[in-house]
Amino acid sequence: MDFTLTPEQQLLRDGLSKFLGARYDLDASREAAKVGAGWQPEIWRSFVDELGVIGACLPESVGGDDGGPEELMVVTEALGHALVIEPFVDTVVLGARLLARTGSPRATAVAEKVAAGSALTALAAVEDGSGGMLNHVSTRAERSGDSWVINGAKAVVTTAPLADHLIVSARTSGDTRDRDGVSLFLVDLGDGAPEGLTMQALRTIDDRRAADLTFADVRVDADALIGTEGEALPLLEHAWDEATAAVVSEAVGAMRKVFDDTVEYAKQRQQFGQSIGSFQALQHRMVDMYIELEQAVAAQYYAILTLNAQPAERAAAVSAAKATASRAARFIGQNAVQLHGGMGMTEELAIGHYFRRLTAVEYEFGSADAHLARFATLTSS
């Protein structure tokens, strides 16, 4: 495997990192997350107009620069390092990239809006009791004249309260766990939620906006069906694997920041007349943190460079990476807080915010146990 970035990818990484270091203020982002709009539209506009990081990860067919998995890794790792709350993975990976693959004119139009920075999307695919299985869909869509009528519920849909468009998985045929019969629908929210859609907003542990959704006879136009009826599951699984790999990269960026801050703190914090970093027991602890980080980096590369492989190979690599990153996120996050002492959990110190994000990452897109089981199933033959 070749891990060397091209000159263009290096420029993308350096430009984004420089921008975030100079203009992305952690206090301002937390304020926006907790009591503000939930994101910073002016930052998102800069991502589009000044840096081109949105288009860098989208195909040319929707107005992007045709970037691939490596560009996705570069961008998401930098976003994780700065603890960016803007919904990049939800809108670009689970949104525009998925929409572009459907080939639907309406989906393509929305993906073009994302590339232009004028729309946010959210994917409503997970249901209570599904265990994160994308084929476990009890939400149903039925034809009614020239329309579709959707009934069901989706759980913890991140970015839904901010989104202009929902991408909803619903069963148009088959039983709840069948692989066939799952379809995708676009539900527009630009003029407010359609009649019958209830959105129970919530905030996650890492300060992101989300919502539980209930669909009660929600009527959408015939062209709201995107992609081929009943054949959406492979598209969903591809997007889900890409998003999982992107979150692994985001976690690597966050873990690098947490590790570096912890080492620096250990050099400065004095105890018994010397820095705590000089104590051998704490040195061993930080070495263990470094080993976990490097294992996560290796798994990240493996997943990213396998995203364009056959579905089974791609899924196995992504599950291996997510299981590794979930374990590392827990170990590094918890030990960083412990080495900082009680102040590690305060709102004033950045480490506490990173710890909460790493805690969420541990379970986002599936826990370590779930991905280990998936990996075992995929590699057992």
Image (tube, grey):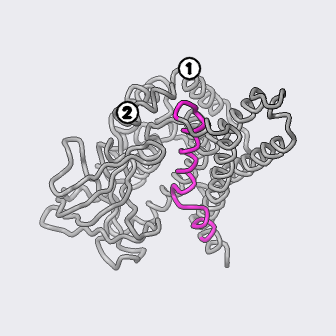
Chief secondary structure of the magenta span?
helix
Q: Is residue 82 magenta?
A: no
The answer to whether residue 264 is left or right of residue 227 is: right
Badge 1: residue crowd in 10 Å (few <14, some 14–19, many ≥20): few
Relative to residue 127, is residue 326 depicted above or below?
A: above
- Dot 2 lies on which element? loop
The answer to whether residue 51 is left or right of residue 274 is: left
Q: Which residue is mark 2?
A: 117
For the magenta stretch, what is the residue range?
347-373
Badge 2: residue crowd in 10 Å (few <14, some 14–19, many ≥20): some
Question: Looking at the image, how many numbered discs can be counted on the residues?
Answer: 2
* Rendering coords of residue 6 (x, y %): 68, 34
- Dot 1 lies on which element? helix
Please identify the quadrant where the C terminus is shown.
bottom right
Determine which of the numbered discs, if any, sits on residue 374 in the image: none
Residue at (36, 39) in percent of width and height: 112
